[in-house]
Amino acid sequence: MEWDNEKIRELMEDKKEADVKKNGGVEGIALKLGSSIKEGISSSSLETRKEKYGPNEIERRKPATFIQLFIDAMKDVVIMILIVAAVVSIVLGGIMCAVHLGEQCPKRLIWQNDPIDLTKETHEGELCVEWLDGVAIIGAVLIVGGVTALNNYKSEQQFRLLQAKQDDALVIVHRDNVVSQVNVVAVVVGDIVTVATGAKIPADGILIHGNDLKVDESSLTGESDAIRKTHEKPFMLSGCTVTEGDGKFLVTAVGRQSEWGKILSELDTVREDTPLQVKLSALAQNIGIIGTVVAGCCFIAQTIIWLVEMSYETCFDALEDDPTKPSETENCFLGHPGMMDKAGCLASGGIWTTHFKNFQPLRLQSIVDYFIDFVTIIVVAVPEGLPLAVTISLAYSVQKMQKDQNLVRVMAACETMGGATNICSDKTGTLTQNLMTVTEGYFQGQPYANRLPTQAELQAAYCVMLLNAIAINSKAELGKVENGRPEIIGNKTEGAMIVFLQELGGDYKALREEASIARTFPFSSAKKRMSTLVRTAAGGCLYTKGASEIIVDICTSYVDNDMVVRPLDEAKRQEMLAQITAMASQGLRTIALAYRDINDVDAAVNSEEAPEEELTCIGIVGIKDPLRKEVPGAVKTCQKAGIKVRMVTGDNLQTAKAIAKECGILTTGAAVEGPDFRKMTPEEQKKLLLTLQVMARCSPTDKLILVRRLKEMGEVVAVTGDGTNDAPALKEADVGLSMGIAGTAVAQEASDIVIMDDNFSSIVKSVLWGRAVYDNIRRFLQFQLCVNVVALVLTLIGSVCGFGMPLKPVQLLWVNLVMDTLGALALATEAPTADLLDRPPYGRHDNLVNDHMWRNIAVQSTYQLIFCMVLLFAGHEILNDCSDGKYGTDYGSCVALNPDGTGKNPPGNYRDTVIYNAFVWAQVFNEFNARKIYNEKNQFDGILTNSIFLSVFVVTALIQFVTTQFGQVVFQTVPLDLDDWIISILIGAVALPLGVLQRFLPPFTFVNRTIAKFHKKSSTVTPEGPESPARVTDGRDRAAESSDPAMVPIVTVPNGNGKYEASRQSVEEGGLN
């Protein structure tokens, strides 16, 4: 290894072909790198090469640390305002304590005429805690920021793991004169790498030889046209993609030393929000606006009440040094809160005046408190947990989907698959096992049904011709033998023919080495064939193989049983076509082999197109690819789930129909060939698509047109693809599904999900997980909206009626933390159940909050508001404080509550503590209700299998007990006695039976109708016929274009008995999007 990285860098940076020649060409450079263009490197030198030239890995930019994420969370504008307000509160509270303004009189409600009973114990000598409100708020904000940062940190880690999987790939290398596959990170300088159409170049290098090799270098150079690689343009650049042909090259730079590595080391993948996250963020913003309005009303109401109270005349003690002036101390007993005894006040030497006239600047602490309330309400109202729930659900689902052989490259695809209405699937390897075997054929002008000829049955010269046609005109290799079958490296169809070649006694490697290949014309998906031109003693020979009926159509002669080339008359042509049809009707893939002699080889080499005319047919092979056992069941499951499965394949129409019938795709629907479909007008295509189930001889262009037409019809389309030319269709589809085994790098780059085992049943699992994600978000949304509605309405009523905020700022922040974070964790990790596939897919514009959810939210919110209002207005008459006055629930002496709700432990409020406790317990139990969206009666179904939900329930209950019983000055609670703990829990537990009863009510359709009218939107449901249930779609769908009054939307929903019932909805119905 004479050269080092610096010498290699000089060569690769200048990219001059003259420098390559000056160093002895690619052969000379290979020697300088201790390699050979024929045998490759020695495996024993791998470690030495990694040390000298570096590994083929790029060290990505380090992810943000927990501290950085925490700081980012703290930069939220609302959070910063809250912190500033809390600091001001601490300062003012501290000053008030210092000048004894903390001992303020209890407030009399503005509508209360009777004086407050001030004869109870005064609790004199207790610590002043006015400043603790601000400290508690800052503490709560820090906890919220910490939890947010922790969630983001974990999400980032999961994304990095996903990124690492995406970077994982296999490449073909030549080492020790043996062809093998290694991971891309194992490629080293000096390796001889083979690339073909669709492959991503794993490292920088110099071309050894190529066959019509073209490379897309737009990712590095911006050049839109593919660059043809020749000895005049030999430089191969990492990160670029082979668009045509194949070839070999010598690796000269890897990892950070490569062109792509230099760029990638400075970049990192940026995640975008999924469509559902965008929709939920918009929803959160709208709710936040409502919350801001409510918060503003509360602030205004509290300020007005404060101004009214400040205007009341009350009694102040006189200053000792000047009895004519009032001190800052109010006489609560004689003043406004108590007896309002002006005469008694004056007789005792007090001064009767208003707070305005005796204004103390520190009284503005109340305004600061109201402002904190205002900001806190906004924080609580904005359901930050919605995007968080999506993140948690997607991250959880993506992790689980990997175990189900689904590598999610674009997280949006996970949720979109849940709404897929059409799956356009390839046949080979997806519906079949991709275990290609030649089982019969047509050789020497005669058929061999259900068997293959032996070597003895074939003429020796014919056998040589057949073996050359297979070996020379293919690129596949055979690897190690496993389970009695050699590993096929490359195209599986070619591999099956090479195995057949070996059974006839041929050696494909020797035949390839003996052949003088002049040019290869790679497989064209448009022409359905490929050719290889070789030089011979007589001139040249062009070997061609491809779709059997296409090859037979351009043949003018054939080789018969006597090795005589005879004209291919119409009778013989029909005989061949009949044999092709017979094999195709058994589900066999048929490939025809042909040749022609070439006189002017140089002219053929330089021509744009292969001279594929007047061919001589050598034979036809029938290749069996067994159907995957699980496919018929998976197809049936999709159809039951309202998803129309269509087969799109490049195979013969008869082969496609036979396989489609076997797996249950083709029933009473239509089958068409791609060229015929392509000739139709768009309207004709749409009409055909209503019944189309199979498209054969489908080119990538046909597949792209198919996807576009389906999307124009309002369908949500998932499409599979494995070839480079499938990339446009994969990009166009709502979800592109590439194959992990047979798929090219281009197809995988264009796709959203990589099916790692190329199995159709894995696609069905992705649908299941997609629906689970959508349902999980709805569960959390149903739960969160109930919390927000009750908290906002309760706060508004309490403020307007003079009670202040029944739920204190710290309590609201705690509720926000529990309900947003722990609620998202509990409800966003529900595992999918089989019944998700018993209903039709969600439509493209399905309402996030459906009619059933509005009903559930309305019932639970109404109940919670009723008990909160009863406790707020009559709690002082209903409740008694029988606690021990400290921390326990043991009974002490019972005292009636004051009208303001205080009991034994002022300034803590016993009544408000009961409201807070009962409110939280109602949310805790409502989490069980939120697990079911429709009319399911059993909220506990499957609960024992969700350990995360049960853990969240236990943790929430424990923390609630601690914050209530021991929170005191921090959480502004007082200890409750045992009776009131039981009452609080029972009030909350009523949510469970109520959750069952509410399922018997009809869905609340008026909410979505009202919202739809407000937004001037409408959605309809398109009937799909007997094979696919109706689904919600947008106004572009066929039903919207119909004037038929019978086309009333119908949505199928669970009825709670494991079945689904139809719910009629108006065409005007819209949703909260």
Image (tube, rainbow, N blue to C red):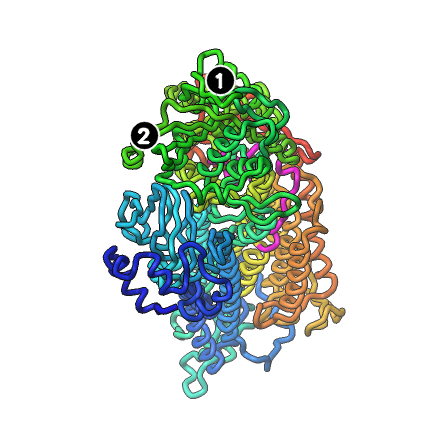
Q: How many labels does the image show?
A: 2
**Label 2 environment density (alpha carbons within 10 Å; few <14, some 14–19, many ≥20):** some
Observer able to see residue 978 = yes
Q: Quadrant of the N terminus?
A: bottom left
Q: Earlier in the sequence, mark 1 or mark 2?
A: 2
Label 2's element?
loop
**Residue 850 counted in the magenta span:** yes
**Residue 105 counted in the magenta span:** no
Q: Position of residue 665 (x, y in %)?
A: 58, 26
The amino acid type of the residue labelled 1 equals Pro
Q: Which contiguous range is marked in magenta?
A: 825-854
Residue 327 position (above or below residue 766): below
In the image: residue 505, left or right of residue 746: right
Residue nearest the observer in this picture, 506 or 234: 506
Q: Which mark is residue 707?
A: none
Residue nearest the observer in this picture, 944 or 33: 33
Q: Position of residue 999 (x, y in %)?
A: 66, 37
Q: Residue 599 carries which label?
A: 2
In the image: residue 852, left or right of residue 471: right
Residue that label 1 marks: 1045
Seen at 49% across and 14% down, the residue is 572
Seen at 34% across and 55% down, the residue is 206
